[in-house]
Protein backbone atom coordinates (compact mmCIF):
# COMPACT_ATOMS: atom_id res chain seq x y z
CA UNK A 1 0.00 0.00 0.00
CA UNK A 2 3.00 2.32 0.41
CA UNK A 3 1.58 3.74 3.61
CA UNK A 4 3.30 5.39 6.52
CA UNK A 5 2.40 3.20 9.50
CA UNK A 6 1.54 4.79 12.84
CA UNK A 7 1.81 2.18 15.59
CA UNK A 8 -0.26 2.61 18.75
CA UNK A 9 0.01 0.63 21.97
CA UNK A 10 0.78 0.84 25.66
CA UNK A 11 4.38 -0.42 25.72
CA UNK A 12 6.83 2.08 24.27
CA UNK A 13 9.68 -0.43 24.06
CA UNK A 14 7.72 -2.82 21.83
CA UNK A 15 6.41 0.00 19.67
CA UNK A 16 9.86 1.46 19.14
CA UNK A 17 11.29 -1.94 18.24
CA UNK A 18 8.54 -2.70 15.74
CA UNK A 19 8.76 0.73 14.12
CA UNK A 20 12.50 0.21 13.79
CA UNK A 21 11.98 -3.13 12.06
CA UNK A 22 9.56 -1.56 9.56
CA UNK A 23 12.06 1.18 8.74
CA UNK A 24 14.90 -1.35 8.52
CA UNK A 25 12.86 -3.31 5.97
CA UNK A 26 12.40 -0.21 3.82
CA UNK A 27 9.08 1.05 5.15
CA UNK A 28 8.04 4.21 6.97
CA UNK A 29 6.72 4.15 10.53
CA UNK A 30 6.29 6.12 13.74
CA UNK A 31 4.71 5.26 17.06
CA UNK A 32 2.65 6.66 19.92
CA UNK A 33 2.11 5.21 23.38
CA UNK A 34 -1.58 5.30 24.31
CA UNK A 35 -4.13 3.29 26.27
CA UNK A 36 -6.95 2.98 23.73
CA UNK A 37 -9.41 2.28 26.56
CA UNK A 38 -8.98 5.91 27.69
CA UNK A 39 -11.44 8.06 25.74
CA UNK A 40 -9.67 11.39 26.23
CA UNK A 41 -6.29 9.85 25.42
CA UNK A 42 -7.67 8.46 22.16
CA UNK A 43 -9.12 11.83 21.17
CA UNK A 44 -5.76 13.50 21.80
CA UNK A 45 -3.87 10.74 19.98
CA UNK A 46 -5.92 11.02 16.79
CA UNK A 47 -5.62 14.81 16.83
CA UNK A 48 -1.84 14.53 17.22
CA UNK A 49 -1.51 12.05 14.35
CA UNK A 50 -3.57 14.32 12.10
CA UNK A 51 -1.40 17.30 13.00
CA UNK A 52 1.79 15.38 12.29
CA UNK A 53 0.82 13.22 9.31
CA UNK A 54 -2.34 14.64 7.75
CA UNK A 55 -5.51 12.64 6.90
CA UNK A 56 -5.79 9.05 8.12
CA UNK A 57 -6.56 6.73 5.21
CA UNK A 58 -6.65 3.36 6.99
CA UNK A 59 -7.21 2.05 10.51
CA UNK A 60 -6.49 -1.50 11.70
CA UNK A 61 -7.97 -2.28 15.11
CA UNK A 62 -5.92 -5.27 16.26
CA UNK A 63 -5.59 -4.71 20.00
CA UNK A 64 -6.53 -7.77 22.01
CA UNK A 65 -5.93 -9.66 25.20
CA UNK A 66 -7.59 -12.52 27.05
CA UNK A 67 -6.86 -15.45 29.31
CA UNK A 68 -8.31 -18.97 29.51
CA UNK A 69 -11.03 -19.30 32.14
CA UNK A 70 -14.53 -20.81 32.41
CA UNK A 71 -17.35 -18.29 32.70
CA UNK A 72 -18.19 -19.32 36.27
CA UNK A 73 -14.75 -18.25 37.49
CA UNK A 74 -14.41 -14.91 35.64
CA UNK A 75 -14.93 -11.97 37.98
CA UNK A 76 -16.32 -8.61 36.92
CA UNK A 77 -12.92 -6.93 36.78
CA UNK A 78 -11.50 -9.60 34.49
CA UNK A 79 -14.54 -9.62 32.20
CA UNK A 80 -14.59 -5.84 31.87
CA UNK A 81 -10.83 -5.68 31.24
CA UNK A 82 -11.09 -8.02 28.26
CA UNK A 83 -14.19 -6.31 26.84
CA UNK A 84 -12.63 -2.86 27.18
CA UNK A 85 -9.50 -3.99 25.34
CA UNK A 86 -11.11 -6.12 22.63
CA UNK A 87 -14.24 -4.05 21.97
CA UNK A 88 -14.40 -0.64 23.66
CA UNK A 89 -10.89 0.38 22.62
CA UNK A 90 -11.57 -0.46 18.99
CA UNK A 91 -14.82 1.49 19.07
CA UNK A 92 -13.10 4.57 20.50
CA UNK A 93 -10.34 4.44 17.89
CA UNK A 94 -12.78 3.99 15.01
CA UNK A 95 -15.14 6.71 16.24
CA UNK A 96 -12.40 9.28 16.65
CA UNK A 97 -10.72 8.45 13.35
CA UNK A 98 -14.09 8.81 11.64
CA UNK A 99 -15.11 12.02 13.41
CA UNK A 100 -11.76 13.75 13.07
CA UNK A 101 -10.64 12.50 9.66
CA UNK A 102 -12.47 9.89 7.59
CA UNK A 103 -15.84 11.66 7.73
CA UNK A 104 -14.22 14.27 5.49
CA UNK A 105 -11.85 12.17 3.37
CA UNK A 106 -13.21 8.61 3.35
CA UNK A 107 -11.08 5.62 4.24
CA UNK A 108 -11.01 1.99 5.27
CA UNK A 109 -11.20 0.32 8.68
CA UNK A 110 -10.40 -3.33 9.45
CA UNK A 111 -11.28 -4.79 12.84
CA UNK A 112 -9.73 -7.92 14.34
CA UNK A 113 -12.11 -10.63 15.51
CA UNK A 114 -11.50 -14.30 16.37
CA UNK A 115 -12.99 -17.73 15.80
CA UNK A 116 -16.01 -17.25 18.06
CA UNK A 117 -18.74 -18.55 15.74
CA UNK A 118 -19.76 -21.56 17.81
CA UNK A 119 -19.32 -19.84 21.13
CA UNK A 120 -15.90 -19.55 22.75
CA UNK A 121 -15.80 -22.03 25.65
CA UNK A 122 -12.99 -21.23 28.04
CA UNK A 123 -12.78 -17.64 26.81
CA UNK A 124 -16.32 -16.33 27.12
CA UNK A 125 -15.18 -12.78 27.87
CA UNK A 126 -13.23 -12.61 24.62
CA UNK A 127 -16.01 -14.28 22.65
CA UNK A 128 -18.53 -11.70 23.85
CA UNK A 129 -16.22 -8.85 22.93
CA UNK A 130 -15.37 -10.25 19.49
CA UNK A 131 -19.04 -10.87 18.70
CA UNK A 132 -19.74 -7.28 19.69
CA UNK A 133 -16.98 -6.06 17.39
CA UNK A 134 -18.46 -7.97 14.47
CA UNK A 135 -21.83 -6.28 14.98
CA UNK A 136 -20.09 -2.93 15.37
CA UNK A 137 -18.34 -3.59 12.05
CA UNK A 138 -21.65 -4.13 10.27
CA UNK A 139 -23.29 -1.12 11.90
CA UNK A 140 -20.41 1.24 11.17
CA UNK A 141 -20.31 0.08 7.55
CA UNK A 142 -23.92 1.21 7.14
CA UNK A 143 -23.72 4.43 9.16
CA UNK A 144 -20.42 5.63 7.68
CA UNK A 145 -20.79 4.43 4.11
CA UNK A 146 -22.13 7.82 2.95
CA UNK A 147 -18.73 9.33 3.76
CA UNK A 148 -16.88 6.79 1.64
CA UNK A 149 -15.73 4.81 4.66
CA UNK A 150 -15.54 1.04 4.37
CA UNK A 151 -15.55 -1.09 7.54
CA UNK A 152 -14.68 -4.79 7.48
CA UNK A 153 -13.22 -7.40 9.80
CA UNK A 154 -11.01 -10.46 9.75
CA UNK A 155 -11.54 -13.46 12.01
CA UNK A 156 -8.38 -15.55 12.36
CA UNK A 157 -8.67 -19.13 13.51
CA UNK A 158 -5.65 -20.96 14.88
CA UNK A 159 -2.63 -18.94 13.77
CA UNK A 160 1.01 -19.73 14.57
CA UNK A 161 2.25 -16.75 16.58
CA UNK A 162 4.33 -15.98 19.64
CA UNK A 163 1.11 -15.60 21.63
CA UNK A 164 0.70 -19.38 21.66
CA UNK A 165 3.72 -19.65 23.95
CA UNK A 166 2.02 -17.53 26.63
CA UNK A 167 -0.52 -20.23 27.47
CA UNK A 168 0.15 -22.86 30.11
CA UNK A 169 -1.08 -26.22 31.36
CA UNK A 170 -3.89 -28.11 29.66
CA UNK A 171 -4.62 -25.33 27.17
CA UNK A 172 -1.03 -25.30 25.94
CA UNK A 173 -1.04 -29.09 25.58
CA UNK A 174 -3.98 -28.87 23.18
CA UNK A 175 -2.31 -26.42 20.77
CA UNK A 176 -0.23 -28.99 18.80
CA UNK A 177 -3.40 -31.03 18.14
CA UNK A 178 -5.50 -28.16 16.77
CA UNK A 179 -4.56 -28.84 13.15
CA UNK A 180 -6.51 -32.10 13.27
CA UNK A 181 -9.73 -30.08 13.60
CA UNK A 182 -9.00 -27.95 10.51
CA UNK A 183 -10.17 -29.24 7.10
CA UNK A 184 -6.89 -28.01 5.56
CA UNK A 185 -5.05 -29.94 8.30
CA UNK A 186 -2.66 -27.21 9.32
CA UNK A 187 -2.28 -24.07 11.41
CA UNK A 188 -2.44 -20.67 9.71
CA UNK A 189 0.36 -18.12 9.47
CA UNK A 190 0.61 -14.46 10.39
CA UNK A 191 1.28 -13.69 6.72
CA UNK A 192 -2.07 -15.18 5.75
CA UNK A 193 -3.83 -12.86 8.19
CA UNK A 194 -1.83 -9.82 7.10
CA UNK A 195 -2.57 -10.51 3.43
CA UNK A 196 -6.31 -10.46 4.05
CA UNK A 197 -6.03 -7.19 5.97
CA UNK A 198 -3.98 -5.55 3.21
CA UNK A 199 -6.52 -6.68 0.62
CA UNK A 200 -9.42 -5.18 2.59
CA UNK A 201 -7.54 -1.89 2.91
CA UNK A 202 -6.60 -1.81 -0.77
CA UNK A 203 -8.47 -0.28 -3.75
CA UNK A 204 -9.15 -3.85 -4.90
CA UNK A 205 -11.71 -4.12 -2.09
CA UNK A 206 -13.37 -0.79 -2.89
CA UNK A 207 -16.87 -2.32 -3.00
CA UNK A 208 -16.50 -4.57 0.03
CA UNK A 209 -17.88 -3.27 3.32
CA UNK A 210 -19.60 -4.71 6.36
CA UNK A 211 -18.06 -8.14 5.86
CA UNK A 212 -15.87 -10.51 7.86
CA UNK A 213 -13.25 -12.76 6.27
CA UNK A 214 -12.71 -15.97 8.21
CA UNK A 215 -9.04 -16.99 8.07
CA UNK A 216 -9.36 -20.44 9.59
CA UNK A 217 -8.94 -23.12 6.93
CA UNK A 218 -12.71 -23.79 7.09
CA UNK A 219 -12.46 -24.90 10.73
CA UNK A 220 -15.53 -22.84 11.66
CA UNK A 221 -17.59 -24.60 8.97
CA UNK A 222 -17.09 -28.14 10.24
CA UNK A 223 -19.70 -30.53 11.58
CA UNK A 224 -19.39 -33.58 13.81
CA UNK A 225 -21.72 -35.31 11.35
CA UNK A 226 -18.94 -35.15 8.77
CA UNK A 227 -15.65 -36.48 10.19
CA UNK A 228 -12.56 -34.94 8.63
CA UNK A 229 -10.38 -37.08 6.40
CA UNK A 230 -6.73 -37.72 7.17
CA UNK A 231 -4.26 -35.16 5.88
CA UNK A 232 -2.57 -35.65 2.52
CA UNK A 233 1.06 -34.48 2.94
CA UNK A 234 1.81 -31.21 1.17
CA UNK A 235 -1.70 -30.67 -0.16
CA UNK A 236 -2.19 -27.36 1.67
CA UNK A 237 0.92 -25.19 1.68
CA UNK A 238 1.27 -22.29 4.10
CA UNK A 239 1.93 -18.80 2.80
CA UNK A 240 4.92 -17.31 4.60
CA UNK A 241 5.46 -13.87 3.14
CA UNK A 242 6.92 -12.25 6.25
CA UNK A 243 10.60 -12.88 6.88
CA UNK A 244 10.32 -11.87 10.54
CA UNK A 245 7.58 -14.41 11.27
CA UNK A 246 8.09 -16.37 14.48
CA UNK A 247 7.18 -20.04 14.90
CA UNK A 248 6.05 -20.53 18.51
CA UNK A 249 8.00 -23.06 20.54
CA UNK A 250 4.86 -25.11 21.17
CA UNK A 251 4.60 -25.85 17.43
CA UNK A 252 8.25 -26.49 16.64
CA UNK A 253 8.80 -29.97 15.30
CA UNK A 254 5.16 -30.26 14.23
CA UNK A 255 5.60 -29.38 10.57
Image (cartoon, rainbow, N blue to C red):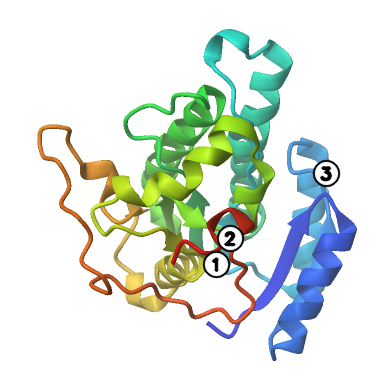
Badge 2 is on which residue?
59
Nearer to me, 121 or 103: 121
Identity of the residue furthest to the bottom in this view:
26
Residue located 49% across and 68% down the image: 194
Q: List x then y, in percent, for residue 210.
A: 34, 50
Left or right of 106 in this view: 167? right
Q: List x then y, in percent, for residue 131.
A: 43, 32
Give the vertical position of 68 relative to 142 (above or below).
above
CA gap, disc 2 to disc 1?
A: 13 Å
Q: Secondary structure at mark 1?
A: helix
* Dot 2 alpha-carbon crowd within 10 angstroms: few under 14, some 14 to 19, many 20 or more: many
Residue located 42% across and 39% down the image: 134
From the image, state whether disc 2 or disc 1 is nearer to you. Answer: 2
Give the vertical position of 7 relative to 34 (above or below).
below
Q: Is residue 62 visible?
A: yes
CA gap, disc 2 to disc 3?
A: 17 Å
Badge 1 is on which residue?
105
Residue 209 is drawn in which quadrant? bottom left
Q: Secondary structure at mark 2?
A: strand
Q: List x then y, in percent, for residue 43.
A: 77, 46
Amino acid sequence: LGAHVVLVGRKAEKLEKTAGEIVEDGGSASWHSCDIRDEEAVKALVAQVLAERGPIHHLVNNAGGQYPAPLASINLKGFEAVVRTNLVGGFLMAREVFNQSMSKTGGSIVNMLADMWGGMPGMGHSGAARAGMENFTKTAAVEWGHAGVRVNAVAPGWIASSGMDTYEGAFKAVIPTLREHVPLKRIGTESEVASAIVFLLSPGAAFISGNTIRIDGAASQGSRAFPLSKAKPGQSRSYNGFHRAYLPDVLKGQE
